[in-house]
Amino acid sequence: MKLVIAIIKPSRLEEVRQALNSLDVHGMTVTEVKGYGRQKGHSEIYRGTEYAVHFLPKLKIEIAVDDAQSDAIVSAIRESAQTGRIGDGKIFVLDLLAVTRIRTGETGAAAL
Amino acid sequence: MTQLKLPKLAGLGALATLALCLPALAQDAAAPVAEAAAEVATIDTGDTSWMLVSTILVILMTIPGLALFYGGLVRAKNILSVLSQVFVTFCMIALLWVAYGYSLAFGGSGEGGLVAYIGDFSNLFLGAVTPDSVSGTIPELVFVVFQLTFAAITAGLIVGGIAERMKFGAVLLFLAIWYTFSYLPIAHMVWSGPGLFFGMGALDFAGGTVVHINSGVAALVAAIVLGPRTGFLKEPIPPHNLTFTFIGACLLWVGWFGFNAGSALAANGLSAQAFLNTITAPAAAGLAWALAEKFTRGHASLLGAASGAVAGLVAITPAAGFAGTFGAIVLGAVAGVVCLWAVVTLKPMLKYDDSLDVFGIHGIGGIVGAIGTGIVAAPSLGGLGAADYNMAGQLGTQVLAVVVAIVWSAVVALVAMLIVKAVFGGARVSESAESDGLDISSHGEHAYNN
C-alpha cells in the first residue's frame, strides 16, 4: 500500500477531487498548509509598514491507495492540479505499512 | 446659514463658545430651591434629547467602536487584551469622572489661585448637581455624562500606543494617573470659563487639544518608555482582522456626530454645521489618504481609506463648530495627507512602536486640526468666526495652547509611566507572556476556539 501526499494550489481542489473520484478513489484527507518552493511570496503593506510574505497558502491531500493504483493516481492528480505556472506543487509517494478501518476493525487492502 | 450675515455668524460662534463655559458658571449660580421652578422652565427638551442621543453616540465610539478598530489591528493572540483594556478603562474613567473628574474639570470659579489650571473639589461625587440643575438649556447631569464619555474615550485612545505588551493593571493605573493629571487640567484650561486657554480665546470645539493631542502625545511617550514589541521591525506583525477594524472605523465615524455636533450643546444651526463638517472633512481625508497611497505605494488600501477618514475626523474635531463647509473639506484633505506622511514616513524614521498609530493620527491630526482651526474659522474663508477674531492672533493662541498641551501631556505621561514601572516592577509583560499572547497570559482567555 502507498500513502500519496500531494501539495497543490487551493484553487485546484475540486478538479483533483473529481479526477480521483473517476478513478474510484472515494476518500481523502485535506489540510490547509503554508509553504513555498520556487514560487516567490508577495508583499503586503499596512499603514506604511511593508511585510514580505514568504509562505503561500496551499492544500495538502493525503490518500491511502493500493500499490497497483498508485501510478495512475499520481498522474491523475498531476493533470488535474496543474496550471502551468510556478507554485503548482509536488506529489510524494510513501510506503504505507498498515491501515485499519476504525468502525469495523478491517485491516489491509480491505480497509482502503 | 448662508442667509445670515457674517457678523451674525461670528456672534453665533461667540455665543457657542460662551455656551461651553456656562456649566462652570452655572455652578456658581447654584440656585436656591425657590428658583428651581424657574430654572426647570429654561430646559429645552429638543436640546436635551439631542444631547442624550449625542452621549449615546460617543459611548458607541468607544465601546465597541474604538475597541474593534484597535482589536482588528493587533494579532489574534492579543485581541481580547485590547478589547479588555478599552472596555475596562471605560468603566474605570466613568467612575473616576463622577467621583472627582467633573469637579476638577469644570468646577472652580472666579480668578486667582489655581483656577486657571484646574477646578476644585466642590462637586465630589456630583454632590452639587441634582436632576434639576441646569446647564445652558439642558440638565446639568446631561452635560456631566456627555463630558464623561469624552474623558473615557480619550483614555481609551492611549491603549493603541501600548498594545500587545503592557501589564493589564499597569495600563489601568497609568491611564488613571494620566487622566487625573493631564486630561482633567487640560480639559479645564480649554473648556472651563476660568480656564487659561478659554480666557485667551483658544478655539477647540470638541476636543482637538483636549482629546487628540493630549492622548496622542501620551501614547507616544508611553510607547517609547515601554519599548517596542518583540520582533518590531524584524518580523511581520500584520493586522489579524481588518474587517473588525473597518467595523470599528464606521462606528467611530457615525458616533463622531455625537462627539462634534453634540459639542454645540444644543440642537440648532451650529450643531447642523458641525454635523455637516463631520461628514465632509473625513470624506475628503479618506479620499486624500487613499489617493496619496495609490500614487506612492501602488494600492489604495482599505486600512488607508479608513485611517484617512479617522484622521479627517480628528482634524475637524476642534474646528467642527468654527469651520465653514469649504474650510472643513480643505482641513480634512490636508489632515489626510499629513497623517499619512506621519504614519508612513515619520514613524519608521524615528523607529518608535506606537503600535496602532495613536500619535500619527490623533496626535498629528489633532495638531493639524487645532492650528487649522485658527485658519478655517476666518469669516473671510467662510468660517463662523469667533469673538474678536483676527487670524494672526488666533493662530498664535492656537499654537500656544497646542505647545502647552504637548509638553504637559508628555511630562505627565512620562512620570505616570515611571510610577507604574516602579509599582508593578516593570510595566511590560514577560517575554514568554508576550510571545504566548496577552489574551492567554493576562486574561486566561482564547478568542478564537473552533
Image (cartoon, grey):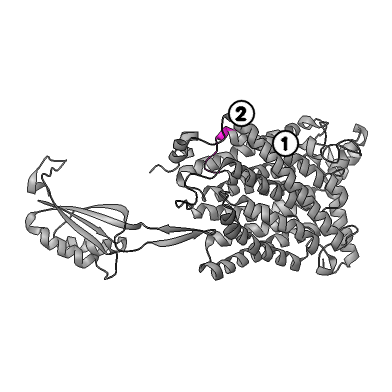
Query: Would residue B136 be seen by someone viewing this image from the given angle?
Result: no
Asked if labels 2 and 1 touch by Cβ distance under 8 angstroms, the answer is no
**Distance of label 1 from label 2 (alpha carbons):** 18 Å
For residue B416, side relative to residue A104 (left or right): right
Query: Does label 1 or label 2 sit earlier along the sequence?
Result: 1
Name the main secondary structure of what is drawn in magenta. Answer: loop
Q: Position of residue B199 (x, y in %)?
A: 88, 48
- x and y, in percent, of residue B179 in the image: 70, 38
How packed mark 2 is, by other alpha carbons closer than 10 Å (few <14, some 14-19, many 20 or more), is few
Q: Which residue is mark 1?
A: B180
Q: Secondary structure at mark 2?
A: helix
Give x and y (percent) for residue B75. 47, 47
Q: Chain of mark 2?
A: B
> What secondary structure is found at the residue carrying circle 1?
helix
Q: Nearer the viewer, mark 1 or mark 2?
A: 2
The residue identified by callout 2 is: B423
In this view, the residue farthest toward the front is: B350
Q: How many marks?
A: 2
Does A84 lie within the magenta span? no
Magenta-tinted stretch: B163-169
Tell me: B120 left or right of B446. right
Q: Amino acid at mark 1?
A: Thr
